[in-house]
Image (spheres, helix red, strand yellow):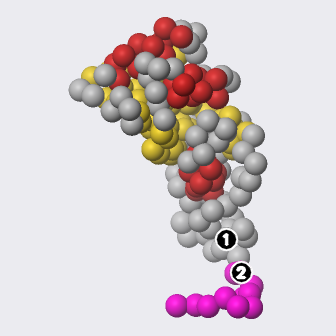
Amino acid sequence: MSKLALDRLIEKFPSEVTSHHAAHGDETAVVKGARLVEICTFLRDDPSTSFEMLTDLTAVDYLGQKEPRFEVVFHLYSLSKNHRLRLKIELPEETPEVPSVLSVWKSANWMEREVYDLYGLQFVGHPDLRRILLYPEFEGHPLRKDYDTEKRQPRIPARSGRTHL
């Protein structure tokens, strides 16, 4: 049961878990970001939790709704235990940075790049943090709630060998 995983997390890192809830199979912990890699490594390696898989990593922009403005959300899954856990890290608008968990789960590579590309959140320690969905010259981050949807983007130069549909 993932409630066991949530309990284990709270037991091991009581000062890092700022809030949590567990109802109807929805186990969530909001944790401080400073020890994120250590927390994720523990959740992966501890025999009672065994979160071998990072299934999703996304972000939420709460512009004008709450502070801090951003949350990074990690969805963990244990193949061997068949349970899930959601971790959230709150990030202020001024310094939207969180440690990269690429060293824990290789699947974080493209997920962190996607969140960087679309929200502009920084994953400290990521070895290749660059746009993955949008072209390098694209200005801004389109999933931020303050992104100007009427903004004209710079044209990209035609590249030889590139085909258009």
The single residue placed furthest to the left in the displayed view is 24
State the residue at coordinates (46%, 27%): 50
Magenta span dominant secondary structure: loop
Q: Decide which of 95, 30 is in the foreground and name it.
A: 30
Q: Amino acid at mark 1?
A: Tyr
State the residue at coordinates (67%, 70%): 135
State the residue at coordinates (62%, 67%): 134
* Residue 67 higher or lower than 57, as above or below: above
Q: Which residues are magenta?
A: 155-165
Residue 133 screen position, x and y as percent: 59, 65
Check residue 135 in the rendering and tell me which mark sits there, or answer none.
1
* Residue 8 higher or lower than 69, as above or below: above
Secondary structure beneath dot 2 equals loop
On the rendered image, what quadrant is the N terminus found in? top left
State the residue at coordinates (44%, 23%): 49
Badge 2: few (under 14), some or many (20 or more) residues near its Cα, within 10 Å? few
Instruction: Name the side, left or right, on which 10 lies relative to 137.
Output: left
Q: Decide which of 48, 16 is in the foreground and name it.
A: 48
Circles 1 and 2: CB distance less than 8 Å?
A: yes
Secondary structure beneath dot 1 equals loop
Q: Which residue is mark 2?
A: 156
Could you tell which of marks 1 and 2 lies nearer the N-terminus? Answer: 1
